[in-house]
Amino acid sequence: MIVRRATIEDGKEIFAIEAECFSVPWSLDSIETELSNQDKKLYYVIEDADGVVGYAGAWLVYDEGQITNIAIRPSARRQGYGATLTSALIEECFKRGMHEIFLEVRVSNLSALSLYRQLRFTVKGMRKDYYSEPKEDAYIMSLVKEEVK
C-alpha cells in the first residue's frame, strides 16, 4: 500500500471512486479544479497492486483544516486503507500549521464514525439536513492538535 500526494493526473480515478461511493459525486471538473490548487488544498491517494483505491482531501484555512471527502472503493474497504489515508492527511495538516481539523459525516455512517472516533475526532455539533439524496443530518466532528499528544 502506498499513500502519496494526489496529482491532476489522478483526477479520473478520483472521479470514478466518487461515483462508486457517493450518491451526489463531485464532477470531474470540480475534482480537477481542487487538484490544480494545492497551496490551500491537500489531496492524497492510496494505492494497492490494482491502482488507486481511495482518496482524501482537505482545505487549509488559516489554522484550520476542513476535510472535504474521504472515499475508499467498496471492494477495498475493511483493510485499513481508510485509517492509513486519513492519518496521513491529518499528519500533513498538522505539519502545515493547522491546529484543528473539522469534517462532516452522515449520522447513519457508522463505519466512518467508528474510524473518526478511532482517530480521536469528537462530535462538536450537528448540521440539520446537510446531506441530500437521501436527506440526512450530519455530525460536525473535529480533532484538536493539542488533544492528540
Image (cartoon, rainbow, N blue to C red):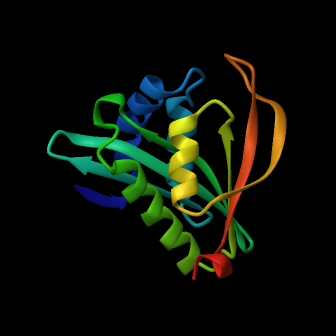
Residue 128 in the figure: left or right of residue 44: right
Percent of width and height locating residue 107: 69, 34
Percent of width and height locating residue 6: 39, 54
Quadrant in which residue 50 is drawn: top left
- The residue closer to the viewer here, 24 or 120, is 120
The C terminus - image quarter: bottom right
The N terminus - image quarter: bottom left
Count of marks overlaid on the render: 0
Residue 64 in the figure: left or right of residue 80: right
The residue lying at 56 percent from left, 53 percent from top is: 116
Using the rendered image of the protein, determine whether residue 9 is visible from the camera's viewpoint. yes
Percent of width and height locating residue 85: 40, 56
The outermost residue toward the top is 133
- The residue closer to the viewer here, 124 or 12, is 124
Using the rendered image of the protein, determine whether residue 33 is visible from the camera's viewpoint. no
Residue 42 in the figure: left or right of residue 67: left
Percent of width and height locating residue 4: 33, 61
The residue lying at 50 percent from left, 39 percent from top is: 111
